[in-house]
Amino acid sequence: MSRMDIRGVSMRYGKNNALQDVTFSLEGNQIYGLFGPNGAGKTTLLRIMSNQLFPETGQVLLDGESVVENDRALRRIFFVGARNLYPDGRSVGKQFAQIKMFYPTFDLEEAGRLSDAFGLDTKARLGSLSTGYQSIFRIVAALCSNTPVVLYDEPVLGLDVNHRERFYGELLAHYVKRPQTILLSTHLIEEAAGLLENVILLCKGKLVLCKKAQDLMERGYTVTGPQGLVSRYAQGKQIIGSEQLGGMKAVHFLEESPESQLPPGLERSRLTLQSICLYLTKEERGEKE
Amino acid sequence: MQLSFQEEKPLYLQIAQGLEDGIVSGAFSEETQIPSTTEISVTYRINPATALKGINLLVSQGVLYKKRGLGMFVAKGARQTLLQKRRESFYQSYVKTLIQEAKQLQLSREEIVALLERGLNE
């Protein structure tokens, strides 16, 4: 079981702060979701975690060892980038064999089985694959890596709903059989919500939160009703957003332990993980209502 | 109504509820094995920890029990226990909400009773 510690990581591109003093940890053998609006720094963070980029400050540790120029550590982290970094002219099967050379834990037989299941032709050249099948190739490689840590950057990019469902199922089946520490960066929050144990939310290079998904979902709720009643109810509570339509008001909360009884005239509904992430990053994004 | 109410619940409670439904309906009979955490997790695309939390809730209530090395089984008398529990919560989750909504619609006592009769006769 492997854990990762990200300590005070900062990164700048020119004047642009891609990451600012990001600190969090991945506990061993748990599934994490990495969410955030476009430009939040998700890919930069994943590339730093897999030693493809060097942070300006801070460090990334795998089981207490820095990952920088550390082959032993890097053989235990599989990074699935959103872009293909392998030669276009190489065949899928040949590339699996190449991956096996750097990652001894890679399961070639399983790669064959999964390619069949996803309809991926292992004789096809990488450059000839459609966007969807490029993603499938990367997914199959990651599912078969058997490394203690797997970092997925937008794994379902360009995949139809059938292939996405298959991926989530295979991810869980592999995870149950052989637990790994998994970080899944995606914009399809609702689809991934059930898979996760933890949520990491980034916005404009800053860490907004790193929490148990269950806790977050139990805390987020909306109260709707006449404006005056809702405003009175909202006093002293943690508000993450609101909407108004005439005299009706809806306020979104993130509360430790919401009381079970609401004053009469008010209605409560649960917020989805996606809505919670949206509201929590609204202010940071600096968008007007 | 009932369906959207279900969705309001955390996933692990929905799993527990789904298993309870299976026991009450007889799909999972007493002293038989229920699907494993792995099966539930992969079928419903949920984290195995969530599935386990749902199962453990029913274990703590004595509805399920663990056979070492085999898996989870439905306890003897589980169906009766669940029926009793559901009858008790019937008032809280159905009757109270019904009255509340009826009051909001300004239905009289007689009208509510008449509607219940109509439901019983259908």
Image (cartoon, rainbow, N blue to C red):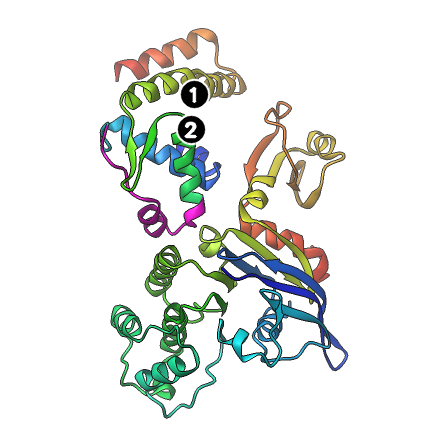
Q: In this view, does A228 lie above or below A153?
A: above
User: In terms of secondary structure, where does tag 1 sit?
Assistant: helix
Looking at the rendered structure, which numbered label has been put on residue A61?
A: none
Quadrant of the rendered image containing residue A13: bottom right
The percent position of residue A234, horizontal first and vertical second, equals 71, 35
Q: In this view, does A48 lie above or below B111?
A: below
- Same chain for marks 2 and 1? yes
Name the residue beneath numbered marker 2.
Answer: B60
Residue B39 among those drawn in magenta = yes
Q: Which region of the structure is painted magenta? A: B31-49
Task: Categorize mark 1 by other alpha carbons within 10 Å: few (<14), some (14-19), many (20+).
Answer: few
Q: Who comes first in sequence, dot 2 or dot 1? A: 2
Which residue is more in the foreground, A143 or B89? A143
Residue A287: tell me if it is visible: no
Quadrant (top left, top right, bottom left, bottom right) of the C terminus of chain A: bottom right
> Disc 2: which chain?
B
**Crowding at mark 2 (Cα within 10 Å: few <14, some 14-19, many 20+):** few
Q: Residue B26 at what x, y percent from top left?
A: 22, 28
Q: Label 1 belongs to which residue?
A: B94
